[in-house]
């Protein structure tokens, strides 16, 4: 597959790269990470002003005419700077569902930077299966009452709306019978338990105790939320794969620079042939990750859901393993101090570790890819 950026996409990539280089130094990120919310609303407003929040949406949706490739471009750049602002949960996941669910009013507020969204899709017993939904939405008057538990809901504490998949019909593992609901911040019966994940990103456990919602809270059609959810998650996978590719590219570059300056036996580490070979292997993995991520992004809008899903799972499975190898190599080449909080490489490796299980680990996506008709090699 041949992919060449358009002039507009090149400008988008350049603008993100300039921001990360000039306006998002690692020490400033460290301070944001330690803050109460874990990211900056002022920086988020600047994203809106730069058009990054609107870049991945069609013009008839209030966007700038882009799509998943534009989201991947932004996420790759954010990966190089480990940007903390909630672009993935709000724009990629939340925005995709608002657009496909027909809520153009909320989408307009989102692209203006005035709205935060979280998607609470993880069920305690689901093990990455999107159809495994035990949270129930019982009919109540003209609306619904939601009861259940959700976990690892990124950006939930800061969100104005939490999108919750709940079962309105069928058994716990059936794809049909799942409905998507918009739950407003502060809804009665909604309880959040915020925490930090291993990479410092904010998430929360979500408890719903008879949360009463009107019919206007439904995204899309009742009982038919699973196809919308699956499409949004596949877009999310393409985006985090692009983020992982950006992280891997940054790790390769900074490790190469470290080997040039760190000396042993009076010579730079870069002069040792075995380290040169390992560095080349890291570079190849990072380049392959970029290709896999953008292939998934290009196919994220494919008319055939199977083609989209296979590309997303193939990228996620491969990048999960490649990211671990690149991160481990970088830590080893930095020596013992590579594991310390003071060294940026440790933070990049933590994010790669988080990405490897987000939306499903490589074992899950190998099985999904095979189930969709793709050939799978043994580890």
Image (spheres, rainbow, N blue to C red):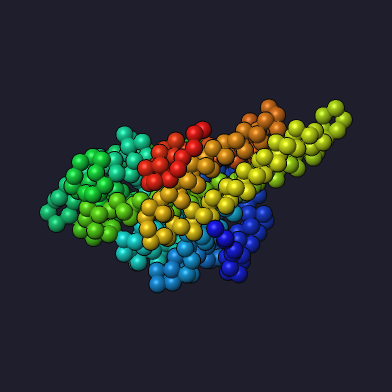
For the image shown, how many numbered marks are present on the structure? 0
Work out which residue is located at the far right of the displayed protein and give it: 266
Work out which residue is located at the far bottom of the displayed protein and give it: 60
In screen coordinates, is 3 left or right of 334? Answer: left
Between 316 and 112, which is closer to the camera in this rendering?
A: 316
Residue in the picture at 52% in, 66% down: 51
Residue 359 appears at what percent x and percent y?
42, 43
Q: Is residue 324 above or below residue 170?
A: above
In screen coordinates, is 101 left or right of 159? Answer: left
Residue 235 appears at what percent x and percent y?
43, 54
Between 133 and 6, which is closer to the camera in this rendering?
A: 6
Work out which residue is located at the far left of the displayed protein and give it: 141
Residue 213 appears at what percent x and percent y?
22, 53
Residue in the picture at 54% in, 50% down: 292
* Res. 15 image quadrant: bottom right
Residue in the picture at 42% in, 60% down: 301
Residue 186 appears at what percent x and percent y?
31, 49
Residue in the picture at 75% in, 32% down: 274
The N terminus lies in quadrant: bottom right
In screen coordinates, is 344 left or right of 309? Answer: right
* Res. 20 image quadrant: bottom right
Is residue 227 in view? yes
In screen coordinates, is 22 left or right of 51? Answer: right
Is residue 183 in view? no
């Amino acid at each position: 597959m041949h992919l060449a950026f358009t002039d507009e996409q090149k400008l988008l990539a350049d603008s993100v790269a300039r921001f990360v280089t000039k306006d998002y130094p690692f020490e400033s990120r460290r301070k944001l990470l330690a803050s109460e919310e874990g990211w900056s609303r002022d920086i988020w407003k600047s994203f809106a002003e730069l058009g990054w929040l609107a870049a991945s949406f069609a013009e008839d949706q209030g966007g700038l005419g882009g799509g998943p490739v534009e989201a991947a471009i932004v996420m790759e750049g954010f990966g190089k700077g480990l940007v903390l602002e909630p672009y993935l949960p709000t724009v990629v996941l939340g925005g995709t569902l608002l657009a496909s669910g027909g809520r153009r009013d909320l989408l307009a507020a989102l692209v203006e930077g005035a709205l935060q969204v979280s998607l609470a899709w993880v069920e305690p017993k689901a093990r990455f299966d999107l159809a495994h939904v035990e949270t129930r939405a019982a009919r109540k008057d003209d609306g619904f009452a939601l009861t259940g538990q959700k976990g690892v809901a990124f950006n939930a504490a800061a969100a104005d709306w939490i999108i919750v998949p709940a079962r309105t019909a069928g058994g716990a593992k059936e794809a049909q019978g799942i409905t998507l609901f918009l739950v407003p911040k502060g809804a009665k019966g909604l309880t959040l338990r915020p925490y930090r994940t291993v990479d410092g990103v904010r998430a929360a456990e979500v408890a719903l105790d008879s949360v009463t919602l009107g019919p206007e809270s439904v995204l899309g059609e009742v009982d038919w939320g699973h196809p919308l959810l699956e499409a949004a998650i596949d877009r999310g996978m393409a985006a985090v794969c692009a983020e992982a590719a950006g992280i891997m590219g940054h790790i390769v570059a900074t490790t190469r620079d470290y080997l040039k300056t760190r000396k042993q036996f009076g010579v730079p580490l870069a002069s040792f042939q075995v380290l040169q070979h390992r560095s080349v292997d890291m570079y190849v993995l990072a380049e392959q990750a970029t290709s896999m991520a953008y292939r998934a992004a290009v196919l994220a809008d494919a008319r055939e859901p199977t083609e989209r899903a296979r590309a997303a799972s193939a990228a996620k499975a491969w990048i999960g393993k490649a990211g671990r190898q690149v991160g481990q190599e970088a830590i080893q080449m930095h020596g013992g101090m590579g594991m310390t909080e003071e060294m940026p490489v440790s933070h990049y490796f933590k994010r790669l570790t988080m990405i490897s299980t987000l939306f499903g680990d490589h074992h899950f996506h190998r099985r999904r890819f095979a189930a969709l008709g793709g050939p799978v090699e043994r580890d």
